[in-house]
Amino acid sequence: MPALRLYDYSASANCYKARLLLAQLGLEYERVAVDIFAGDTLTDEYELLNPHRSTPVLQLRDGRALVESNAILWYLATGTPFLPDDPLAQAEVCRWLIYEQTDVMFNIGGLRFRLITGRWRPEHEEAQHRHAGALEALAVLDRHLAERAFLVGDRYSIADIAVFGYAHVADEAGLDTSGYPSFRAWLERVRAQPGFVDDLEPYPPNAAVLAGASVYG
Amino acid sequence: MPALRLYDYSASANCYKARLLLAQLGLEYERVAVDIFAGDTLTDEYELLNPHRSTPVLQLRDGRALVESNAILWYLATGTPFLPDDPLAQAEVCRWLIYEQTDVMFNIGGLRFRLITGRWRPEHEEAQHRHAGALEALAVLDRHLAERAFLVGDRYSIADIAVFGYAHVADEAGLDTSGYPSFRAWLERVRAQPGFVDDLEPYPPNAAVLAGASVYG
């Protein structure tokens, strides 16, 4: 076993978040490709690894596996400058890690995935609903970032990495971000961080989603 | 200012989670009632306090406010037995805090709220979808708890408090939990914890939801 193994789908922004932090920490890891469109997350073996059937999964040398992209960020960032020590700042990071999954990924990621893979057209009722939710999330981020360089404590942290994952591809979800200048300036500040990489690959167009597979990777 | 002030809606399980931990920690706090059905979360003043317009909000003596129920749990539990020290165990807690919001609250809480307040009937398409998602979450919890006393590290923690919030009222969402015995045994273990309280109040029947108000409290 390597020290770290990442079960990873290259077109999932949840997986990209883990790859970005691993790159910025300079950590070596073994990457195991998981193709959610080929049913790789639907096997009994994968369920044992991750009962949520999502990607990414981080496996440690002793075989223990950690699931939920943002929990993986938390583990890797512990004791590094990517996670502040102060209890209130840590709780603020926790706040954004949750908001990212409930509002940023759910709306922007959910919309992007279904538009790109042809499951929804923009006029679909739920697409309209998520479009509105995505704009609300962008407005929350824009207002928050109007007074701050980064999401928590004026320092780049895993809160920024988590939110950047899906927020930086908002245009691929058909969202116009030109009305959110503080948000856009923050995207550039994230891109300017040492060790930044963006290796998020495109979804295969019109990929068929298998029943039971997580749509987010 | 008191040391701690909780902006709180008595029928919100997100708020109940904070009240439960505060009771178990033996902490005094000032409770400020927020009525989401009366528009209390839609004022400009409330938006300044919490841009997400959700409840609960924890305000500290210096005026700083923390939002997201599970981030509040994290802050209050830091340095106490309710949050383990070990980095992997902390990341596991983070995992369940996120899963609680994306799957447990979203499906069970979302369904319960809309059925009780008459927004959906059980045969509504999205109600059926959430019903299936809720059963999947109960199955994940049941399998996980078949081999463990509590969600993380075999000790009661804020992971249990967070998931208990909406999971313990699954029956009010029309869910039959009799097929999940390990889940039900865990509910009883949580109820047997020192200082346990359950002061979650019922939603007002047929309450009208105001546009822009969070449906979860």
Image (cartoon, coloured by chain):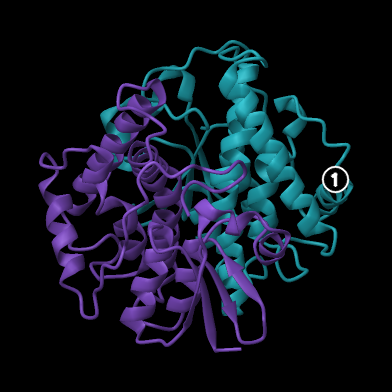
Chain colours: A cyan, B purple
Q: Is residue A154 left or right of residue A162?
A: right
Q: Is residue B192 left or right of residue A106?
A: left
Residue depicted at x 23% and y 50%: B144
Give the image location of residue B163, x and y in percent.
33, 56
Q: Is residue A16 above or below residue A143?
A: above
Residue B156, picture quadrant? bottom left
Q: Is residue B109 above or below residue A123?
A: below
Residue at mark 1: chain: A
Q: Which residue is mark 1?
A: A184
Label 1 SS = helix
Give the image location of residue A112, x and y in percent.
65, 26
Q: Which of the two residues, A70 or B97, is positioned nearer the viewer here? A: B97
Residue depicted at x 59% and y 39%: A105
Q: Is residue A29 left or right of residue A38?
A: right
Give the image location of residue B55, x and y in percent.
52, 60
Residue B206 seen in the figure: yes
Residue depicted at x 43% and y 55%: B95
Residue depicted at x 73% and y 59%: B44
Other-residue count near label 1 (Cα within 10 Å), few / some / many at <14 / 14–19 / ≥20? some
Q: Is residue B9 above or below residue A177?
A: below
Given the image, on which type of amino acid does mark 1 rest? Arg
Residue B53 seen in the figure: no
Q: Which of the two residues, B14 or A51, is positioned nearer the viewer here? A: B14
